[in-house]
Image (tube, rainbow, N blue to C red):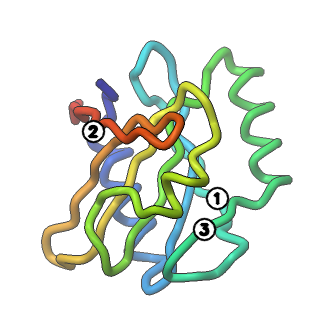
């Protein structure tokens, strides 16, 4: 289970809305399955169908997390027009081990959805999110 503070959950949705109609992406850090920090990343692909994080930003975030005794708990991105579930491309590109993959969907603008998944070797398992 991934525990996400309401303020960070709301920031994921705000980031998705700010980037609409393009996908946005970011990293969630923390410890013991509890998120304590969000890093909005640049989607270098500038696409509404896929994302690629800026490698320099990604490296800087990992370095900062380690310096603060935190770990990368999740990679998040938005689906501007499709449900909050992994696409075939999301599954194929889920190469970071031991992290959750969080997807925020704006398919229903007035009722955004945020879901988390464990993805390993092409196998997708839904994960519960607890908003704290």
Side of 59 relative to 91 (left or right): right
> Toward the viewer: 67 or 91?
91
Q: Earlier in the sequence, mark 1 or mark 2?
A: 1
Give the mark toward the camera: 2 or 3: 2
Q: Residue 35's quadrant in the figure?
A: top left
Q: Mark number for residue 25?
A: none
Given this view, does label 1 or label 3 mark the residue nearer the observer?
A: 3
Which of labels 1 and 2 is toward the front? 2
Mark 1 and mark 3 lie on one chain; the one further toward the N terminus is 1
| SS at circle 3 | loop
Residue 26 visible at all = yes
User: Observer-nearest residue: 130 or 18?
Assistant: 130
Neighbourhood count class around disc 3 (C-alpha, 10 Å): few under 14, some 14–19, many 20 upward: many
Q: What x and y, as percent, mark residue 36?
A: 46, 29
Label 2, on which residue? 126
Q: CA distance from mark 1 to mark 3?
A: 10 Å
Q: Quadrant of residue 104?
A: bottom left
Q: Earlier in the sequence, mark 2 or mark 3?
A: 3
Q: Given the current orientation, which residue lies at the most extreme bottom position? A: 21
Helix, strand or loop at label 2? It is strand
Q: Which mark is residue 51?
A: 3
- Marks 1 and 2 sit apart, C-alpha to C-alpha, by 24 Å
What kind of element bears circle 1? strand
Tell me the number on the disc at residue 41. Answer: 1
Query: Distance between the Cα atoms at labels 2 and 3?
Result: 21 Å
* Res 37 visible: no
- Image quarter of the C terminus: top left
Quadrant of the snapshot with the N terminus:
top left
Q: Residue at horizontal 61%, vertical 23%?
A: 71
Residue located at (31% from left, 54% from top):
10
Q: Is residue 84 above or below residue 8?
A: below
**Residue nearer the viewer, 52 or 41:** 52
């Amino acid at each position: 289970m991934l525990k996400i503070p309401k303020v960070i959950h709301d920031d994921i949705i705000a980031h998705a809305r700010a980037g609409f109609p393009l996908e946005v992406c970011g990293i969630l850090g923390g410890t013991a399955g509890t998120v304590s920090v969000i890093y909005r990343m640049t989607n270098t692909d500038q696409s509404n169908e896929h994302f690629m994080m800026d490698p320099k930003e990604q490296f800087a975030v990992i370095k900062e997390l380690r310096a603060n005794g935190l770990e990368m708990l999740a990679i998040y991105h938005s689906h501007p027009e499709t449900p909050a579930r992994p696409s075939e491309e999301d599954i194929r590109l889920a190469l970071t081990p031991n992290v959750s993959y969080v997807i925020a969907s704006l398919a229903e603008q007035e009722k955004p959805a945020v879901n988390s998944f464990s993805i390993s070797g092409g196998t997708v398992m839904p994960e519960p999110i607890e908003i704290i």
